[in-house]
Image (cartoon, grey):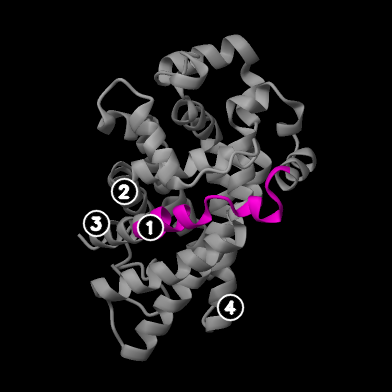
C-alpha cells in the first residue's frame, strides 16, 4: 500500500490507492471482522445497558443467561443481530476509510505538511471530519443494532425487534422518524476516539517508515501499532460509547432520564458509582483490540492488492 513514508494513506499520485479502493478495503474489512467478533459485541452491549439499571453482572453471568434463557441453538443466540451489525460495520468502515483518505489528501495538499507535527494534526483533523460524517450517516443503523441485539425475549417477550424490516416498522409506528437522531450527540462526541486512534496509528506508521526506510509494514508491526492505538483511544472515550448505547436502547423511549446526557450520567453514577461509566470496558477491549487488529490487517492486505 504505502509508497511514501508519510502515512499508510500516502499522497503519491502514481502509487496511492484511490478513495474508492479505500472504501472497498474498509467495506471488506468491516464485514469480516464484525462477523468474527459479533458474540463479544453482544456481550459488551448487554454490559453497557446494565449500567443504568443497577444490575451487577459480569460477562460470565451474561453468557450463562444467554445459554439458559433461549430455546434456540446457543450459537444463533450469540449471533443475534449479526446481519445489522455486519451491515453497519461494513458501511461505517467503508465510509470512514474513504472519507478519511479524501480529507487527508486535501489537507496535505492545502497545508503542504511535511513535518511529523503538522502531519499528526492532519491525521487528527481528517479523523475527526471522517468520524463526524460517518456517525451522522450511520446513526440509524446503530439504533437498529442496539434494539435487535439488546432484546431479551425471556424478559421482555417478543417486542418486535426480530429483524431489520420488522424493527424499522415498529420504530416508525411507535416513535416516528424523529427517533433516528437519538444518540447522535454522544456518537459525534465519541468521534474523538477514531480521531485519536488514527493520529496515533498513522504517526507510529510514519515513524516506522522513516526509521527503517520501509514501504510496507509486516504483520507483527500492523498488529502492534493497531493494538497500542486502539487501547489508548478506546480507554479515553469509552463513557461516550456507553452513553450512546443506553440512549439508543428500548429504555430510552420509556424513561426521560435516558433521553438527555445531563440526566443519564447522574443516573449511571447513582446506580453504579463513577466506575459505572466504564462498565464493560474490559470486555470491550477484549473485543475491540483483536477486532481492530483484524480489520486493519485485512484493510492493509486488500489495499495492497
Instruction: Tell me which numbered mark, 4 or 2, is placed earlier along the sequence.
Output: 2
Query: In the rendering, at what x and y percent does residue 227 appear?
Result: 40, 68
The residue positioned 35% from the left and 42% from the top of the image is 38
Which residue lies under the disc numbered 3? 302
Image disc number at residue 118: 4
Which residue lies under the disc numbered 1? 292
Q: How crowded is mark 3: few (under 14 residues within 10 Å), some or many (20 or more)?
A: some
> Label 1, label 2: how many angstroms apart (C-alpha)?
8 Å
Q: Do the residues labelled 3 and 1 touch (CB within 8 Å)?
A: no
Q: Is residue 261 above or below residue 163?
A: below
Q: Element at badge 3? A: helix
Of marks 4 and 3, the one in the foreground? 3
> Label 1, label 4: how many angstroms apart (C-alpha)?
26 Å
Q: Is residue 166 above or below residue 94?
A: above
Assess whether residue 226 is covered by the magenta stretch. no
Q: Are marks 1 and 2 in contact (CB under 8 Å)?
A: yes
Amino acid at each position: 500500500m504505502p509508497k511514501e513514508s508519510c502515512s499508510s494513506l500516502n499522497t503519491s499520485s502514481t502509487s496511492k490507492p484511490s478513495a474508492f479502493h479505500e472504501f472497498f478495503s474498509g467495506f471488506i474489512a468491516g464485514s469480516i471482522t464484525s462477523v468474527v467478533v459479533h458474540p463479544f459485541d453482544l456481550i459488551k452491549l448487554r454490559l453497557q445497558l446494565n449500567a443504568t439499571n443497577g444490575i451487577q453482572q459480569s460477562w460470565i453471568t451474561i453468557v450463562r443467561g444467554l445459554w439458559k434463557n433461549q430455546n434456540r441453538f446457543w450459537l444463533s443466540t450469540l449471533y443475534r443481530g449479526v446481519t445489522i451489525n455486519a451491515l453497519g460495520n461494513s458501511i461505517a468502515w467503508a465510509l470512514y476509510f474513504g472519507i478519511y483518505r479524501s480529507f487527508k489528501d486535501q489537507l496535505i495538499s492545502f497545508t503542504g505538511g511535511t513535518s511529523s507535527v503538522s502531519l499528526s494534526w492532519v491525521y487528527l483533523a481528517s479523523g475527526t471530519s471522517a468520524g463526524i460524517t460517518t456517525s451522522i450517516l450511520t446513526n440509524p443503523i446503530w439504533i437498529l443494532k442496539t434494539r435487535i441485539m439488546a432484546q431479551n425475549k425471556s424478559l421482555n417477550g417478543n417486542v418486535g425487534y426480530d429483524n431489520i424490516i420488522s424493527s424499522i416498522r415498529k420504530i416508525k409506528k411507535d416513535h416516528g422518524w424523529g427517533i433516528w437522531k437519538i444518540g447522535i450527540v454522544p456518537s459525534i462526541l465519541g468521534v474523538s476516539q477514531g480521531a485519536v486512534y488514527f493520529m496515533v496509528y498513522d504517526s507510529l506508521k510514519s515513524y516506522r517508515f522513516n526509521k527503517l526506510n520501509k514501504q510496507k509494514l509486516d504483520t507483527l508491526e500492523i498488529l502492534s501499532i493497531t493494538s497500542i492505538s486502539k487501547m489508548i483511544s478506546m480507554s479515553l472515550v469509552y463513557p461516550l460509547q456507553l452513553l450512546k448505547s443506553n440512549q439508543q436502547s428500548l429504555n430510552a423511549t420509556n424513561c426521560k432520564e435516558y433521553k438527555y446526557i445531563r440526566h443519564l450520567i447522574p443516573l449511571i453514577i447513582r446506580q453504579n458509582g463513577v466506575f459505572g461509566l466504564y462498565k464493560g470496558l474490559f470486555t470491550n477491549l477484549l473485543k475491540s483490540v483483536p477486532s481492530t487488529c483484524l480489520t486493519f490487517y485485512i484493510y492493509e492486505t486488500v489495499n495492497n492488492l
